[in-house]
Image: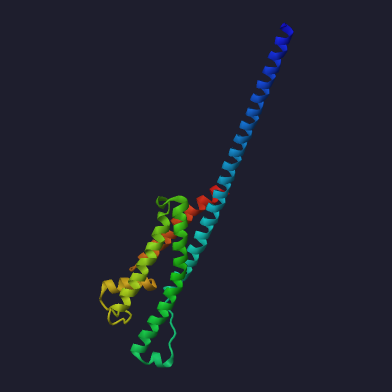
Amino acid sequence: MLTKLYLQYVACFSKNFFQFINTGIVGIGVWIAYQGLTTWKKQIKGQDEYKLAAEIMENAYDLEERLRYARGRLYSYTSEEAGNKDKQSNAHYQQHAERINLMLEANNKLRVLKLRADALWGRANTNDLDEVLRLIKQFVSRFEIFYQAGWDDPQNRKGDQVADDMWITLHGSFSKNKPDIFWNNFSDAIEKLEDKMRKKIAFDH
């Protein structure tokens, strides 16, 4: 009788023990799968952040070069335009506007990347990109005001400090007495954006 009870006890114990072992194995498997999924998600996010940061800088550099071109002072005129003040002024505006449009193409790409950056990092972490876009918006606004006021004619801006400042914003300055505040601000914004994106690229790799 005791032997029978002992055997029943051993059988019951063995059954419960193996159930416990199986449950533990399943639990460990679930934990390993969870850890693997978490690691995979981190890797995917890291890859996304790396690609986005690199793409932002690539487009920011493109925007910077197009802005340089938009601020250039060299324009070409036909003999007819060169001999007529109004036609020359109109040609100047048209060529400048074309350069602005090329710049805005790069700017619009950066604006789209800004939306992706906001979604991935949060708007509080994209302030440097905001500043770059704000300065471009300021540049375009001053371009419109400059030509509407007729300040492309040197005679119309003679002695007008505001007009001179607009000219420097749109075309730069070669005088130490008249600093190129706009370009300095834009260069600072690009540098700060570089620093932030570099950290993300370095962190994710």
> What residue lies at 40% left-to-right and 58% top-to-bottom?
130
Above or below: residue 108 compared with residue 121: below
- Please say which color scheme the image uses: rainbow
Residue situated in front as seen by the camera: 67 or 167: 67
Residue 168, x across and y down, in percent: 35, 71
* Residue 9 as seen in the image, left or right of residue 138: right
Q: Quadrant of the N terminus?
A: top right
Above or below: residue 12 compared with residue 40: above
Residue situated in front as seen by the camera: 23 or 110: 23
Q: Residue furthest left?
A: 159
Above or below: residue 169 compared with residue 88: above
> What residue lies at 39% left-to-right and 71% top-to-bottom?
172
Q: Residue furthest top?
A: 2
> What residue lies at 43% left-to-right and 62% top-to-bottom?
187
Residue situated in front as seen by the camera: 181 or 124: 124
In this rendering, does residue 134 appear at all? yes
Give the total number of marks visible in the rendering: 0
The quadrant holding residue 38 is: top right
Residue 75, x across and y down, in percent: 43, 82
> What residue lies at 65% left-to-right and 21% top-to-bottom?
16
Residue situated in front as seen by the camera: 184 or 66: 66
Above or below: residue 159 compared with residue 78: above
* Residue 61 as seen in the image, left or right of residue 82: right
Q: Residue furthest front?
A: 1
In this rendering, does residue 180 appear at all? no
* Residue 73 as seen in the image, left or right of residue 150: right
The quadrant holding residue 79 is: bottom left
